[in-house]
Image: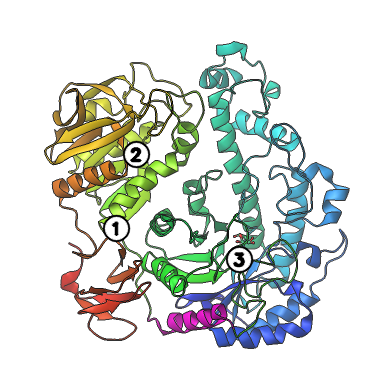
Amino acid sequence: MTTGRDRRRALGGVLYGADYNPEQWPADVWPQDMTLMRQAGVTCVSVGVFAWARIQPTEQTFDFAWLDQVLDLLHDAGIGANLATATASPPPWVSNRYPEILPCDDSGARYWPGSRQHFAPSSPRYRELAAGLVSRIAQRYARHPAVVMWHVGNEFGCHLPMDFSDAARDAFRDWLRAAYGSIDALNDAWGTAFWSQSYHDFDEVFPPRKAPYSRNPSAMLDFRRFTSDMWLQCYLMERQILHDAGAVQPITTNLLGPFKPANYAQWAPHLDVIADDCYPDPADPHALPHAAFQRDLIRSLKPGVPWLLMEQATDAVNWRTFNLGKRPGRLAAETAQCIGRGADGIMFFQWRQSRAGSEKFHSAMLPHAGTGTRTWQDAVALGATIAALPALPPPGRDARVALVFDWENWWAVEERDHPTTLNYLELVHRWYRALHRRHLMVDIVAAERVDADYDLVIAPQLYLLRETGATALASFVESGGTLLATAFSDVVDEHDRFLPGGFLTRLGPLLGIRLTDFGVLVPPGSPGVGEQVAPFTDRRGTAAGTLLAEEIEVVDAEVLAVFSGGAPAMTSRHVGAGRALYLATIPDEAGTQHVVDGLIELTGVQPVVDNLPACVEAARRGDLVTIVNHGDVPVTVTVDGTDVLTHTAADGLVLPPDGFAFIRTAPSAEMS
Ligand code: GLA
């Protein structure tokens, strides 16, 4: 009898593979796939992600013969299957017989079948049909020796950030009932006395569909929470069915990094392993630091547990307006970035390039042009590199710096009708880029996750600050940490309401300041009044603030920087051994670097490796240091340790453009 341990065997080492869609090919191609997969060093493939129509061609019939054959072939080839539950694209018979499963946009227009993800996550009928399918798959394959992991759904919410269908209406009412208990509590939380919106019954509430003007922001916020919960419920339903059928393999679904529609911080406890899809755009100058941000965010979701890169592209994608390919070496460099930042699996979309359909121009491990291509050779070479890696340490608590990133805040801060319009992710990214340039290891966490193991915490625009988050930030400071809070923070409670007593009601006493005005500036480059920036000067020089130059009143803090008119721009309050800093503006790119460099001086936080050029990335994973040269010229790097691939001392290592090294550091070089 096969044991759970056998079924997990392929999870040893770093997994390598791709989405495998054999249903798109005749059966005589499959044995050839196995041969080529072995040649490429493939150890695991995601099977059947969009195979619902093939598995269940009609409501009453299931066809597993082909999948039996595929899984047996994989097993014989020593390749593990990350078996999908196939629920991401209901077949045409579903939409025809049960049109109530179709989702709607905010004007009530239906999304029709003909693509994928055309289902309302709250639809009871969809859930019933999906449950039926998953039960059959789980019962048949829970003990199949090829199955090493389960892939539930696919990129929940990817094409449908919010569904406003009647199914959503009914489920939203139930969700509100459970959340508030009484309609009075809802009226209070949503401030419905404004604009005559008071409800008498939960059944009077609609999803925030298209309205003549601005929709109630508290309702919008709850609808976003509800939406994230609906996708999560679909995942949890399938997970439960897998468990009920006796599945013991890890269960996951593929996340999308910083993805606004789903609050992954709440999802993470339900994923045995965090899996992520990431497609850096070769045309984007910030693509690599932003990809590093994504890896750090994903790693931070489950501290200490390696994650899986479930999908990346070998070369170009097909869904951007202009689909640039990767330059030679870039694929391996991006892969090294993942491993260095905690990944224990590197997989692609997809194994064999499709011959038809919407993604036929998307790259794959095995291109349409065959094995004579650079892409294939690169995929094979990368497989060999991955196979040569020794067992890697799990990612530890390697970061002493945390950047606060919060989904609920993202939803709230980007609502309309605010003093100014902010792009939260761009602002968080800007701080990350400044930290990344200085080779600091950073965790990306909600305020509640901030603890005394960090030395420095930066919280960009934490407009919605929960009491629990404020408490965690305060104890972090009290225990000796340095916190930088920034403009437009601590403005509203968890219902997007002002708290009594003005602004900064939760952090003000810690920071030793009061906020009197947001001081809006038009963005740089705006027509009309012209560019408005707010220069601020500290002992290290002058930098530019943008968008907001808040008026703050210093109650009990030291002024570290002043705006050109002399008003305080940055303050610091000593609290025990810690400090609570406030920056009353949003610095531009250079200004953000200026502030970060000041914080590094102040706190003494150490880079992963000293004296690296900005184009070289460094990450720490336990005792493993990963160096990647993203620049255009070779660089020479010295780290006290041994290159795990060449087994030589990492002394004077020359890394060409896109070159990388994994270095097992000597204990003395480990982070203090
Ligand atoms: C996503 C999906 C895949 C495929 C790729 C293409 O990640 O999960 O099915 O569509 O995008 O880049």
Q: Residue at x 43, y 28 (%)?
A: 527
Residue 240 in the image: above or below residue 192: below
Sequence-first disc among 1 and 3:
3
Q: Which is more foreground, mark 1 or mark 3?
A: 1
Specify start and end residues of the magenta stretch as a single range.
373-390
Q: Nearer the viewer, residue 648 or 562?
A: 562
CA–CA distance between discs 3 and 2?
A: 36 Å
Residue 402 in the image: above or below residue 137: above
Sequence-first disc among 3 and 2:
3
Q: Is residue 61 magenta?
A: no
CA–CA distance between discs 1 and 3?
A: 31 Å
Q: Nearer the viewer, residue 20 or 334?
A: 334
Task: Work out whether residue 512 can be spotted.
Answer: no
Query: Predominant secondary structure in magenta?
Result: helix
Q: Nearer the viewer, residue 579 or 517?
A: 517
Residue at label 3?
150
The quadrant of the image that shows the C terminus is bottom left
Q: Residue at x 65, y 85 (%)?
A: 34
Q: Is residue 380 magenta?
A: yes
Residue at label 1?
441
Question: Where does residue 396 sit, x and y in percent of width and height?
Answer: 32, 63
Q: Residue at x 28, y 29 (%)?
A: 507
Q: Residue at x 53, y 26 (%)?
A: 218
Q: Quadrant of ligand 1?
A: bottom right
Sequence-first disc among 2 and 1:
1
> Which amino acid is tagged 2?
Pro
Q: Secondary structure at mark 3?
A: strand
